[in-house]
Image (spheres, rainbow, N blue to C red):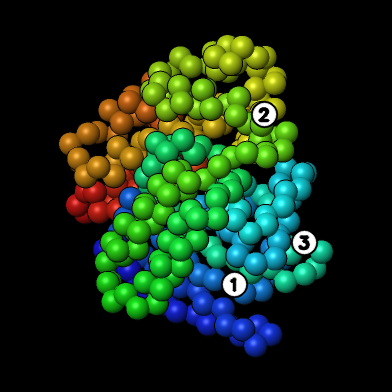
Amino acid sequence: MEQLTERKQFHINGQQQNRFMFKSGEFELPLYMDSIGVNPEQESVDRTKGYPYFHWLQTIEGEGEFELNGRRYSLPPGHGSLLFPGVPHFYAAKGGRKWSTLYVTFGGVLAASMLASLGIRHTEWLHWDEDAPITSQLITMINQAQHDEDRTGLNASAQLYRFLTMIKIYGQKGGRSSVFQHLEKLDPLLGWLDVNYGDPDISLTDMAEKLLISPRYLNSLFRQAFGITAYAYLIRLRIIKSKEMMSLGDSSRSIKEIAQLSGYRDSSHFIAAFGKTEGITPEQFRKLHGLISG
């Protein structure tokens, strides 16, 4: 795989905005950086369908204001937000004042599972102590993107993983609003699904019983967290896990076997669900990522 780094510079009110975008080559890394940069005067953004990649955004000066699921959240200095793909959101400078940000966007077939292993399974709002190295690490990554001659994308991927672990180590979740306090109720179920997703008999009732709540309330929590129902989340999780299996480079596993391991009783239902989610068949996914010849 080859990734070419493109540097973009904008001048806003006499200040320079640096943005570095990474263009994927023929194959993708399991975890890769899409873009990284600094915006000295962050503009307002309205994404009714969310962003296609994971998106970390933090404040270095001023204060931003987010709107998510009909609620507003502030992002002052020392605070950051990790937005999951496809989550509708709006953000802008609070009170129309200057708001400066750092950001990084990323993806990869293993990105979701790596975040889950760090205990991050939905959009998070984090803050950290002044001496935490989160901001300095992100600035280092931006400087590295400016000067790095690496054409494989491996350096950026390695730094990205280190940054995500820093978020886990130093990020604090205190001061959440009521919606995100409710989301914490989902964590035991999400952990259970990470292990038991391959059981084809899992039902909405089974999931609700894990949290001792009604199926209706469970769906309400999932809609607040992910914009989809609990069972739609399970389908998405199964597709993510199947992509991980196909990304391990072991082409000896048949589509039928992967379907069964992912929680589907037959390959036809798996292929249909995969195509609806990804827009291609599992076999096409394998070819696209160089996992089989032909």
Residue tagged by mark 2? 182
- Where does label 1 land, which residue? 39
Kindly indicate the quadrant of the structure image that contains residue 182: top right
Quarter location, residue 213: top right
Q: Quadrant of residue 71?
A: top right
Q: Is residue 244 left or right of residue 36?
A: left
Q: Quick one: 244 or 73, which is closer to the camera?
A: 73
Relative to 42, residue 281 above or below:
above
- Residue depicted at x 71% and y 61%: 63
Amino acid identity at mark 3: Lys
User: Could you tell me if the residues under marks 2 and 3 are in contact, i.e. CB atoms within 8 Å?
Assistant: no
Separation of disc 1 and disc 2 at Cα?
32 Å
Q: Give the image location of residue 91, x and y in percent.
A: 71, 58
Badge 3 is on which residue?
94
**Label 1 neighbourhood size at 10 Å, few (<14), some (14-19), many (20+)?**
many
Q: Residue at x 63, y 39 (%)?
A: 174
Q: Nearer the viewer, residue 64 or 268?
A: 64
Left-right relation of 196 to 103: left
Q: Earlier in the sequence, mark 1 or mark 2?
A: 1
Q: Residue 89 placed where, x, y %?
A: 68, 52
Is residue 206 shown to the viewer in this render? yes
Picture coordinates of residue 247, whole percent (x, y)? 29, 44
Query: Is the residue 12 above or below the residue 224 in the image?
Result: below
Three-letter amino acid code at disc 2? Answer: His
Residue 140, placed above or below residue 245: below
Q: What whole-number distance in Å separates the C-alpha atoms at marks 2 and 3?
A: 26 Å
**Horizontal placement of 292 versus 137: left or right?**
left
Give SS at disc 3: helix
Q: Amino acid at mark 1?
A: Asn
Residue projecting furthest to the bottom? 14
Give the x, y percent position of residue 263.
40, 24
- CB of mark 3 within 8 Å of CB of mark 1? no
